[in-house]
Amino acid sequence: MTTPKRPGTFVVSLDFELYWGMTDAATLDAYGANIRGVRTAIPRMLDLFVRYGIHATWATIGMLMARSKTELLSLLPPPERRPTYVDPRLSSYEYLKTAPVGEEESVDPYHFGSSLVERIKETPGQEIANHTFSHYYCIEGNAHLVETLGADLDAHARVSALHGVRTRSIVFPRNQVSPEALLVCAEHGITAYRGTENHFLYRPRRDEEQTLFVRALRLFDHYVDVSGYHTYPTPVRTSDLPVNVPASRFFRPWIRALSLLEPLRMRRIKNAMTHAAKRGEVFHLWWHPHNFGVNQDRNFKNLETILEHFASLRKTYGMESHSMAEVAETAA
């Protein structure tokens, strides 16, 4: 096979949230095992990434980076600069008022993860990125986005600095991208963001717009080609706004009910990766560490299968692994 003129790119990004990303979606009783499992899942992922030479982007909630509850509370923006969603249950600030948040990580593995941040930071090729400070939603009815998102990003910058990190990439919670939010991010030094797939199924939506029909089609799309490969040419910088490094595929966790369909799902991902490698394009795979919190052996078997496929594509077509920030750096 002929190597493409420009090597294809394999991008991996992870939405590192602990429970801050699930407070409005599931109870601790129902989802706690997934969150606890992050403690072992992240080191296993990092070991695999080192073994296969994967440069990954870890979009991290700022609140989990705090080393104690006292430190967390000291970093909060003032009340007048916090988001006011139509549904207050979406607000991590409202959640904090009554949440059972412990004093620090050793007694509260659900809300604090500074040791995991340090582990990621110390691993070669890993980028610690921004997932906002408070799991901030950009299209959920907040009337003062410029002021409140700016304050949220300021808080993330303060807690990141405590770890010696300056973030350059952002992943918006629930992929809620908006033009106004990108302007704010540019003002805060963000150079790359993860956009959504170029298909109506994946356009940014408020939670109330995530209809059963859309969810069903998205699920079907993981096993049968409904929306295409979602590979794309290397992004080109056309303005001072952050460069869009769009998602290609969410790496769904293994679940027993759909286990017989796993070969279809894996083939769908590998076919898209091969398509990108042959054409010198980008394939961007993403997931949450807590997706691997349970059924770890099954999930890591699938992950290693994907990474082995990448290694084959690297050998055959010269495919490379880059973080989101590295992709933005190469944008002309």
Image (tube, rainbow, N blue to C red):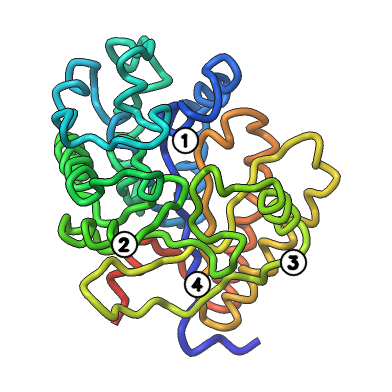
Question: Which residue in the structure is indicated by mark 2?
Answer: 325
Which quadrant of the structure image shows residue 30? top right
Alpha-carbon neighbours of circle 1 within 10 Å: few (<14), some, or many (≥20)?
many
Q: CA distance from mark 4 to mark 3?
A: 18 Å
Per the rendering, the mark at residue 54 is none
Question: Which residue in the structure is indicated by mark 3?
Answer: 225
Per the rendering, the mark at residue 42 is 1
Secondary structure under the numbered disc 2 in the rendered image: helix
In front: label 1 or label 4: 4
Q: Position of residue 150 (x, y in %)?
A: 18, 47
Q: Amino acid at mark 2?
A: Ala
Q: Amino acid at mark 1?
A: Ile
Mark earlier in primary sequence (3, 1): 1
Asked if marks 2 and 4 touch (Cβ < 8 Å), the reply is no
Q: Is residue 89 above or below residue 242?
A: above
Asked if marks 1 and 4 touch (Cβ < 8 Å), the reply is no
Asked if marks 3 and 1 touch (Cβ < 8 Å), the reply is no
Mark earlier in primary sequence (1, 4): 1
Q: Position of residue 162 (x, y in %)?
A: 15, 34
